[in-house]
Amino acid sequence: MDNGYTQRVLTFNFDNILMRACGLIGLYPSIYDFTNADVNLQNLIIDPSIIYLHGQSYGFRQLNDENETKSHANNMTNFIAQTLNTSPVIVAGYSGYNDGFFEQIDKHYCGEQRLFWIGYEKEIPEHLRDFFKKYKNHAHYIGGQDADDFFVSLMQNLKCLPSFFTQHAQHTIKILDEVIDFPVPNTDGGINILSDLRQQMNDFAVKVLSLSAILNNFIMEGKNNEVVEHVERKYGRISDGFDNTTIDEEIKYIYVWAQINAAKEDWMEIKKRGFYEDNDEAIESIFKRFESSEILKPEMHEIYLGWGYILSELAYITSDIDTYDKSIKKFSKVSELDSSVLGHSQSWGTNLLMLAELTGDTSYNSQALEKLIVAETLYPTNVYNLACAYLRLGQTEEAKRKLIICKESNTLPPKEFLLNDQDMKIFYDTPWFEDLIVNLE
């Protein structure tokens, strides 16, 4: 909002956390309580603004009951339509289940502007699927997101992180510049609290920060390569034989996260460019990031998780048996370090299915089934690969049940994929299979 990317925030919450957050950076937007305002006067709203749709905690009215929130949503028809169709919209922290607001979105959104729905669930929830199918070119569901992490990442990418995160003294000086001097009475102006405080902050601003403070600032700004450069400038290049006892644990931790994040960024850049022979050096540098991280913090399962995911994608692109095998070993290491981490089970099981196909070793199929059953507990509608594993093990009826779940959840692959998947061959030319794929694109 301070940088002009956001003009208006609509909230169902009653608390004042948004106002307090704005106050921290010296921003004071207009505040509107729509339980007491005339919602048909939306053209008079002065932006930037925060709009409380259901009231405020210290206001005269808060809407809690489903009937009153639904009725209120109906009263905001014109306002909602204008909001949706005059600027891009980000929806975050809202399930779409209650209060009748999603009904208004569904009714009035017409695809003139982009809509981004940030959801905690990895897959589009069932009650939202028809909406996103209808507006698939303009409305986008971004799943598996924690709202706080999403907005921090967004600020990093837009390079609009509030200055108080990384330039503490300068930020305070800027705020103090807006406050008039405060001389103490009966001192003839000799003692001025504000001028003294400004001088103290100016003195603090020129002090050299500790390495951990510098690294934390870089991490907050998303400058992962700067973290790596600063650490290696002080301690030397981190490779085999490095004595990791020479580095403070906090610095190790920051360094490793910077390497993991930088590896993901580098991998995304390679995928964006496309895969060519000259990618070998870039891919190797990604793996070196994980190797140096492993030297410093071999007990961090996040290292092997990120490593395994990238190896999985690379293996799928290259159909390389050795790369699949390496990815499985990384996933195995994750489970060895922390058995409570299960999110990689889907990729792990899929990799085992691919190894069975590439090597002809059918023992991989039963291992894949084990991992994909675990994945089903996390992603109960994303079970196509589980159906394939059941088919390979001769459990046709169980496979059918999983495929039906996929159809009902709109998680089946495209029709062309199904018609070329050898695992589905047993169903070809059967009425059941024809019914399964009849409406697929």
Image (cartoon, helix red, strand yellow):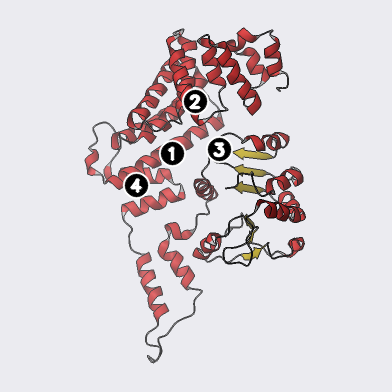
- The residue lying toward the viewer, choosing from 59 and 116, is 59
The residue that disc 1 covers is: 262
The answer for how far apart the CA atoms under marks 4 and 3 are is: 37 Å
- The residue lying toward the viewer, choosing from 209 and 441, is 441
Name the amino acid type tagged 2: Glu
Question: Which labelled disc corresponds to residue 229?
Answer: none
Please tell me in which quadrant of the rendered image residue 55 appears.
bottom right
- The residue lying toward the viewer, choosing from 394 and 350, is 394
Identity of the residue drawn at 74% across and 45% down: 109
In the figure, is residue 330 to the left or right of 431?
left
**Residue contact at pointers 4 and 3, CB within 8 angstroms:** no
Mark 3 or mark 2: whose residue is earlier in sequence: 3
The answer for how far apart the CA atoms under marks 4 and 2 are is: 30 Å
Name the amino acid type tagged 4: His
- The residue lying toward the viewer, choosing from 6 and 401, is 401
Find numbered disc 1 in the image and state the secondary structure of the residue it sits on: helix
Quadrant (top left/top right/bottom left/bottom right) for the C terminus: top right
Question: Which labelled disc corresponds to residue 313?
Answer: 2
Mark 4 or mark 2: whose residue is earlier in sequence: 4
Mark 4 or mark 3: whose residue is earlier in sequence: 3
Find numbered disc 3 in the image and state the secondary structure of the residue it sits on: loop
The answer for how far apart the CA atoms under marks 3 and 2 are is: 22 Å
Check the image and report above or below for 33 versus 158.
below
The residue that disc 4 covers is: 230
Please tell me in which quadrant of the rendered image residue 366 appears.
top left
Identity of the residue drawn at 44% across and 13% down: 364
